Amino acid sequence: MTAKKISISISADLAVFMENYKKSKDCKSISQIVEEALILLREKELENAYREANTEIDDSWDVLAGDGLSDETW
């Protein structure tokens, strides 16, 4: 993985939280914590996008998903 160095500003409370988290979870660096947090944020956004896309599904397509067999055949 290629890393890109960036500079961010965060509140003092979050900076303290990250330092405490780093120590308690034995993380290698603050960068690792930020990366893990961003991965979780990206997963949450993707989950929300899938949830939204699911609401756009046209129920009339359900008839095409069947195999044409009724329950009585089994």
Image: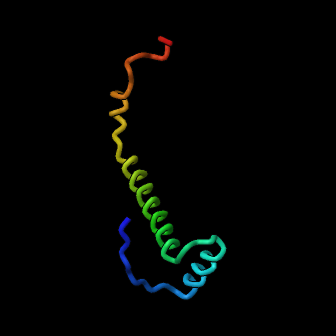
16 in relation to 62, above or below: below
Query: Viewer-proximal residue, 29 or 60?
Result: 29
- Residue pictured at 38% horizontal, 21% vertical: 67
- Residue pictured at 52% horizontal, 77% vertical: 30
Query: Viewer-proximal residue, 1 or 40?
Result: 1
Q: How many marks?
A: 0
- Residue pictured at 48% horizontal, 75% vertical: 31
Which quarter of the image is occupied by the N terminus?
bottom left
Residue 50 picture location, percent across and down: 40, 51
Q: Residue furthest right?
A: 24
Image quadrant where residue 68 sits? top left
Say whether residue 23 is left or right of residue 33: right
Query: Viewer-proximal residue, 18 or 64?
Result: 18
Residue 7 picture location, percent across and down: 40, 84
- Residue pictured at 44% horizontal, 16% vertical: 70
60 in relation to 71, above or below: below
Q: How is the image coloured?
A: rainbow
Residue 37 picture location, percent across and down: 50, 69
Q: Residue furthest bottom?
A: 12
Residue 34 picture location, percent across and down: 49, 73
Say whether residue 34 is left or right of residue 13: left
